[in-house]
Amino acid sequence: MAAIRNKLGAVIGAGLVLTMLAGCSGNSNSNGATPSGSAGSAAGASGTASAEAKPVEITWWNFPNYQALDGEVGKYEKQIIAAFNGKYPNIKVNLEMITFDGGPEKLNVAIATNSAPDVIYDAPGRIVDWGKKGLLAPLNDMVTDEVKSDISDAFWKQSSVGDQIYMYPINTAPFLMAVNKTVFEKIGALDLLPLDKPDRTWTLAEYEKALQAVKEKAPDVIPSGFFAKSQAGDQGTRAYIANLGVSRFLSEDNGKVAINTDNAAKALDWIVKGSKDGLVVSGAASLAAADVNDLFLQGKLAFTLNYSAVLKAQNVPNKKVPFEEVLLPFPTLDGSEPKLEPYVGGMAIFDNDSAEKVEAAKKLVDFVANDEVWGKKNIIQTGGLSVRNSVTGLYGDDSEYKYSELARKFITDPPTVADGYADIRTFWFPELQRALLGASTGKEALDAFAEKANKAIADAKAKAGK
């Protein structure tokens, strides 16, 4: 294992100047590291561990997956650790909070220097890639038959490499669009939104009417957003174009690009034209996902295209003006059912050549996911839904959470499990930029992306001996 890490570390270290993965959410609400959580005391322990058990110390790095308490990022995680130490007083957990902006690069540096954390709460895009590189400890022995059957195969597929489980899935939410409902109420155009339909599905023509109404009746509000500065939040742009063009991003077997269809190309051309006609934010080539969501939170944007129930909850304290947002699926060219990518959050354990640390980390993962008291509390604190089919109704009668649970029926398999995915996503946003800047047509941009991405898939498969 150490030899594998050393070899990989040299590769990663040499490539740190490249753009790093930037988090599935594209959000950046945290503001730096938080000190270590307390280790707890044996005197207060009420769980199963003995105070005489061999002490072990592990490090947990966490993006701001949980909503801040009292404005303090990491405060909730400290409460988890304190409760965990009530059961396992012999396991000291050192907490370090990382940001969605800088965290990916910090992780790459840590891996390259053989100083990776023991536990990480993250998403499949990075975790699966680490699993393919042999950096993680398999979690198969943690997954009971009951848990296995209670979580859909789609989530296990995103958590595994072959038959090895590398991420313990915990929370989820379909990636959707969001609309500033208050804007449409003010301009008397609420009927243009598909809120009277239980599944809220709608067509591109209906969507365009809504955008036009905002342009004409609320000139101080940008009708819709788009972004292509970096790969952060790329799931929003690829799902947007795929649904507008009724296309898949990759083929069903993830073996090649499928987004370079004529309809998807027309959808990209429509976005480019919309930026000129005032229906889409101008300067999208230089905007990041976080920039667009910030415009939305400022009340300056009617539709944002990279949202979820998780982000809706996390963004409550970040709104600059009061307004009500609601979640919507991506419109499709012909009104067919949309295909939504899921956000999936879960925990992974780095194999740092210590069986004791791996076993201690597994206890923390199990506590976070399955503790009788803290399991559901932790999901609610993420603002997401449980990946477990048996755990529903966590948010009572909240209409947007009810819709998110309904919208799970539109979830499709995301490309994050594809061979070469880490490279695939680096080719996406430069081609979007070319189209937005008028250097290529939509078809030329998507064909160029397909050529590069297909090569990355083939190279990754060859390297893996497939």
Image (cartoon, helix red, strand yellow):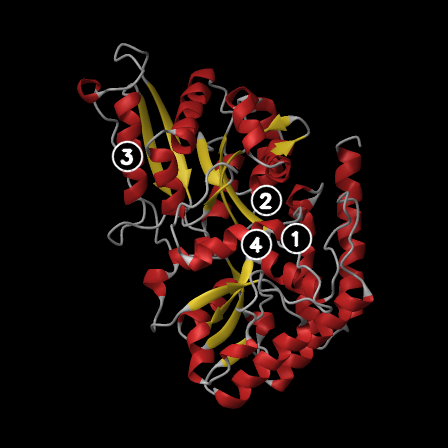
Mark 3 residue type: Gly
Residue 300 x, y percent position in the rendering: 44, 77
How crowded pointer 4 is (Cα within 10 Å; few <14, some 14-19, many 20+) is rated as many
Tags 1 and 3 touching, CB below 8 Å:
no
Looking at the image, residue 378 sits to the left or right of residue 451; the answer is left
Tags 1 and 2 touching, CB below 8 Å:
yes
Q: Which label is found at residue 125?
A: 2
- Looking at marks 1 and 3 on the same chain, the residue that comes earlier in the sequence is marked by 3
Residue 184 x, y percent position in the rendering: 47, 79
Residue at x 47% of width, y 82% of height: 221
- Looking at marks 3 and 2 on the same chain, the residue that comes earlier in the sequence is marked by 3
Mark 2 residue type: Gly
Residues at marks 2 and 4, CA–CA distance in whole angstroms:
22 Å
Residues at marks 3 and 2, CA–CA distance in whole angstroms:
27 Å
Residues at marks 1 and 4, CA–CA distance in whole angstroms:
25 Å
Residues at marks 1 and 3, CA–CA distance in whole angstroms:
35 Å
Mark 4 residue type: Ala
Q: Nearer the viewer, residue 164 or 384?
A: 384
From the image, tell me which residue sits under label 4.
Answer: 407
Q: Is residue 174 visible?
A: no
Tags 1 and 4 touching, CB below 8 Å:
no
Q: Secondary structure at mark 3?
A: loop
Residue 22 x, y percent position in the rendering: 53, 52
Question: Against 413, is 52 above or below?
Answer: above
- Looking at marks 3 and 4 on the same chain, the residue that comes earlier in the sequence is marked by 3
From the image, tell me which residue sits under label 1.
Answer: 425
How crowded pointer 1 is (Cα within 10 Å; few <14, some 14-19, many 20+) is rated as many
Residue at x 71% of width, y 77% of height: 438
Residues at marks 3 and 4, CA–CA distance in whole angstroms:
37 Å
Question: Against 285, is 167 above or below?
Answer: above
